[in-house]
Amino acid sequence: MSTRLLRELRDRLDAAGLVGSFVVRDLATGEQVAIDPARRYAAASLVKVPLALAVLDRVARGEIDPAHRVEVAPGTNGPADRAGAPGLGRFRHPATVAVDDLLYLALAISDSAAADALFALVPPAAVAEHLDDLGIGGIAVRHTLAPLVGTAVERLAPEDAHLAYRLAAALGTPGGGHPVEQLDVGLASSAAAGSLADLLQEVWRPTRVRPEVAARVRMLMGHSVMRQRLAPDFSSDAERWSSKTGTVLNQRHEMGVVEHDDGARLAVVALTESRVAAAVQPGAEAVMGGVARALHDLLRAG
């Protein structure tokens, strides 16, 4: 591993106002390159992947009918006019959606209202237990997605939202504690990049996950419409990128797998925290992708 390159990548993150945890792992050999792979972050919407695994396992066992229709009330995850609320979160009237379609909405468009409808069928504690049964540690699933829309951002006027981001960046502790509950790794759903790479390993090379469950999750992640972070660096005619993003306040994450035409499959996990008091940071997301790609290329180069 190039110590000089890793130092340069850390400097690149710092110049963009970021700290981050990155893992790139060859799923065939287990070889990986990483930056702070054990550091924990709030998981945010990344928990939708273990949620899907747990729901689909119950479908495979005949405990949940994928055609079962669930009624989702409007405003389940905040007001319909709230920025950044895709899918059912925008609906103004009750909707009835089949479990199978809730899975698509939750993973492909990161619909948190759909995910919480699934959490009503398989609660967070049951999802956490399923991860334990699979032998995947280091991922804490503690709550539904609804608390993620209960931060100061939702209570402030748009012109004052920067204050919430400023406080989020300033008040964390080195150990991951935070007065904002949604960012405290001891209270919120949380994970480390290394643990999320383990999860991707099991989805793409299943040993304990049922093959049909893993295949469905891979397909849903491949349909993700969230393409603004790592996808620009991992999508081409010779590469297929399947992923899930996660966002809460000043933390922006993505985990996925890039599949090359030569058969290589690499898990890529990027977890970041920004000290810049802004909701929209395309430059930071570009740096995330660039750092992840540089680590990928380092591993591929051998």
Image: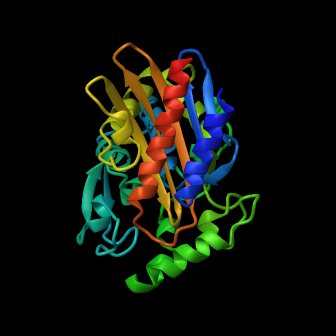
Picture coordinates of residue 267, whole percent (x, y)? 50, 30
Q: Residue at x 44, y 27 (%)?
A: 214
| Vertical placement of residue 16 versus 149, above or below | above
For the question of whether residue 47 can be seen, the reply is: yes
Count of marks, rendered view: 0
For the question of whether residue 53 can be seen, the reply is: no
**Quadrant that contains the C terminus:** top right
Foreground pick, 290 / 174: 290
Q: Residue at x 39, y 24 (%)?
A: 259
What color scheme is it?
rainbow
Picture coordinates of residue 190, whole percent (x, y)? 62, 52
Picture coordinates of residue 15, whole percent (x, y)? 55, 57
**Quadrant that contains the N terminus:** top right
| Vertical placement of residue 3 versus 247, above or below | above
Picture coordinates of residue 260, whole percent (x, y)? 37, 21
Foreground pick, 39 / 66: 39
Q: Residue at x 53, y 73 (%)?
A: 165
In the picture, measured across the screen, residue 184 lies left or right of residue 154, that is: right
Q: Quadrant of residue 79?
A: bottom left
Foreground pick, 244 / 275: 275
